[in-house]
Image (tube, helix red, strand yellow):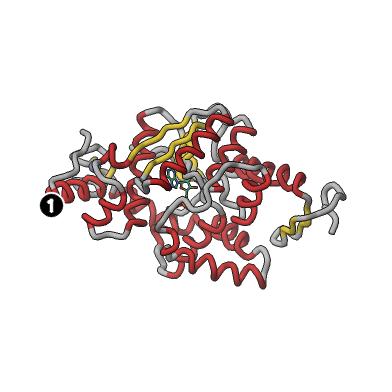
Amino acid sequence: MKCQICGGKATIDLNHHNLKICESCFLTFFKKKVEKTIKKLKLFERNEKLLLAVSGGKDSMGLWQILSCLNYNVDGIYIDLGFGDISNKIKEKIEVLAKILNKKLIVIDLKERIGFDLKELSKFTNRVACSLCGLVKRYIMNEIALKENYSAIITGHNLDDETSILLKNVLRWEFAYLGRQSPLLESMDGFVKKVKPYIFCYEKETLLYAIISKIPYIKDTCPYSTKSKNKTLKMAFHILEHSSPGIKLNFMKLFLKKRNFFIPFREREIKELVKKCNYCGYPTDKEICALCTILERSKNENSVGKRQP
Ligand code: AMP
Ligand code: ZN
């Protein structure tokens, strides 16, 4: 098998691109693909102050290295959710990469910030950890980005993550969620811009990139991930992709072409976010935002957690 770029020995088969390639050409090809996505979708510019959400996994760690190579001004933020030894190991690896890349890393300890770690929060609220995790991460990242004047929050969501969420939203005909699903959500009052440069990158590619580049990533960053329902949808796509290579990429690209149809449903939702939370000032459609509601209830019921003002 010959590399279709340099003619050397190909060891990687990217059948979704109908491309056989060697390791060295793959690294260049993949970096170019990410840069092309940033430019084509107008995600951000080199003069912007960017904040990358770093989980310690292959996606966000590889992306940090690529954005640094491409000379973007990108700091990292890690939210320590309180998984004990796992969190400590993750933090160490992220600190190693931050040093290699010579980039600033912001570490936020959830328990210090809100008075509870994720497990406690889940127990007090009787809600599954995954839904709370998304809520607190979104809230804290937005809060820090606003405070520290970052123009965008970048996440490492890849094509497999995004197509499984897309399929979930289609199966439930969640029009407002479909209108919100985008690799680029522009900033609006109280919310910083959110971008996903790995939107067209298969998980197989992000994994290969991290391994070949010897990025010091952690394999399992979340003890709850095995219970995730998205895993089933990812497996369904795996079967579809096997019989029709490229189907995932097409599903996403065609959705983005037709996404305008769903935008009015999102705008209706945005119009409702006109209030500011009485406690923290976060945009909300109620008097008190979702996080403050949870924290106040937990505090009253358990009289343990204390919030910073
Ligand atoms: P996940 O939901 O775990 O697949 O993560 C998706 C993306 O969210 C990652 O690629 C990161 O950009 C970001 N992320 C997840 N967990 C954390 C965390 N604890 N701290 C900072 N960013 C995170
Ligand atoms: Zn609030």
Seen at 55% across and 58% down, the residue is 160
Q: Can residue 189 be seen in this snapshot? A: no
Q: Is residue 46 above or below residue 158?
A: above
Q: Quadrant of the C terminus?
A: top left
Ligand 2 has an atom within 8 Å of the beta carbon of the residue at disc 1: no
Of 76 and 109, nearer the camera is 109
In this rendering, position of residue 176 left or right of residue 292: right
Q: Residue furthest right?
A: 7
Residue under circle 1? 301
- Secondary structure under tag 1 reads helix
Query: Mark 1 is on which residue type?
Result: Glu
Q: From the viewer's perspective, is residue 254 above or below residue 79?
A: below
Label 1: how many Cα within 10 Å (few below 14, some 14–19, many 20+): few
Quarter of the view holding residue 99: top right
Instruction: Give the image location of residue 173, x and y in percent.
Output: 41, 67
User: Residue 210 placed where, x, y %?
Assistant: 62, 46
Q: Report whether 3 appears left or right of 163.
A: right
Q: Quadrant of residue 227?
A: bottom left
Q: Which residue appears at 23% of the width and 37% of the height?
A: 280
Relative image position of residue 132 (x, y in whole percent): 32, 53
**Residue plotted at (64% across, 40% down):** 35
At 87% from the left and 50% from the top, the residue drawn is 7
